[in-house]
Image (cartoon, grey):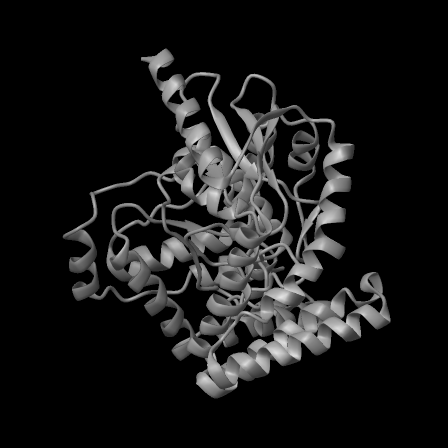
Amino acid sequence: MIMSLLASLALLNIAVRPRVAAALSSTAPAFRPDTSDYRALILSSAPLLDVRAPVEFLQGSLPGSINCPILTDSERHLVGTCYKENGQEAAIAMGNELVCGSSRASRLESWKTFCCDNPTEGYLCCFRGGLRSTTAQSWIEGETGTRYPLVKGGFKAVRRFLIDELERSLAPGSAELVVIGGRTGSGKTLAIQALGGGGIDLEGLARHRGSTFGRIPEDPEQPSQVAFENGVSIAFLRALAEYPSPGGRVYVEDEGGRIGNLQLPLPLRSRMGAADGVAVIEEGMESRLDVLVEDYVVELGARFEALKGEERGKEEHAAFLREGLLRIQKKLGGTRHAELAGTMEAALTEQRSTGDTSLHRVWLAALLVEYYDPMYDYQMERGGREVLFRGDREGVIEWAAAAAESLERRTI
């Protein structure tokens, strides 16, 4: 039904606007073909004009894509209802009525802006690479005189490629997978980030720090499960592009099955359980507390204040810490939770009046000893993976760098 609507819309006459056509033709090549080279599309970080409805885009998207829909959610709903109640012809008529005049002009203007901003590297994309993207392609060409290329097979085909590619990335014969382990506060994410292209920051892709205090203020909503899985596959694809020969290493942080509300892709969970080895970061209690105070008290507080203003930011940061502690009340026990909540309130009061954050170390240390450390030690005992290296955070980073240099010498 929607396909018939779009076919009808594509037959509308479109007046060419010479100014926009000139802007495109001055920067774009005479012809760029449609593409099914999904690997090149991903590795080049090509901008994508996604014309699916917003609800589809929110369910799953690709990095670098911008949603400029040909039918809005409400339009899809109205047309779909009309189709069910009155049949195809009535639905097409309603679609023609909805997507015309100013609404059609507004959509075209958004598409033209994207095309002018990305004249030599961008692509059009819809769900299957069918009538929605070809209709948008036709409208843009009629308006500008330039044919803008599309992704063959659309989002569905790229999604299939990324699912298969993640399995290939984790298969025997690809780069080794080494897990960076260590107790909470040891700075595993800092080590991953220091490893550059060889390290994959799963928590960064999930937009969550992985703990009960892991929500990120700037991104209160995590990506969809599909978007997260796409991001993980793309990260491996790019990391493995660094290793043209077998034997290279990719590093990930040791995670459970979930990061916030998101599940790790099953192939990755399985592979991490049977990883080629573990590098364990061992830091003392004071160093770990330094990391946690910086992460969850100083930096996080500053981010709340930058978003909400000083006064409201302080209030929301305090509420965030209280909520995080409340989420593990059952595991701590009611009495112990009340004791730590009281220490947290005293720490927040002292910090607000004097700027001193030292009292935060008391309740954080208790959480490490009583909650996080026993949980991590249990997971490590059950892991059964070979420990390749133990050392402090800088030692692990240096060890990984030395392994990369050794590989480079062997492959020259």
Residue at 39% across / 28% down in the picture? 242
Q: Is residue 372 visible?
A: yes
Residue at 39% across / 18% down in the picture? 406
Q: Pick whichever, 406 or 294, lies toward us.
A: 294
Count of numbered marks: 0
Quadrant of the image containing the C terminus: top left
Q: Pick whichever, 401 or 411, lies toward us.
A: 401
Please state the horizontal and vertical placement of residue 186, each as a whole percent of the image.
56, 47
Residue 368 is drawn in which quadrant? Answer: bottom right
**395 lies above or below 296:** above
**78 lies above or below 239:** below
Please state the horizontal and vertical placement of residue 367, each as a whole percent of the image.
70, 60
Residue at 40% across / 46% down in the picture? 150
Quadrant of the image containing the N terminus: bottom right
Residue 39 is drawn in which quadrant? Answer: top left
Q: Pick whichever, 21 or 219, lies toward us.
A: 219
Please state the horizontal and vertical placement of residue 241, each as a whole percent of the image.
41, 29
**262 lies above or below 198:** below
Residue at 73% across / 41% down in the picture? 377
Q: Pick whichever, 31 or 371, lies toward us.
A: 371
Please state the horizontal and vertical placement of residue 305, each as a whole percent of the image.
45, 78
Q: Is residue 85 visible?
A: no
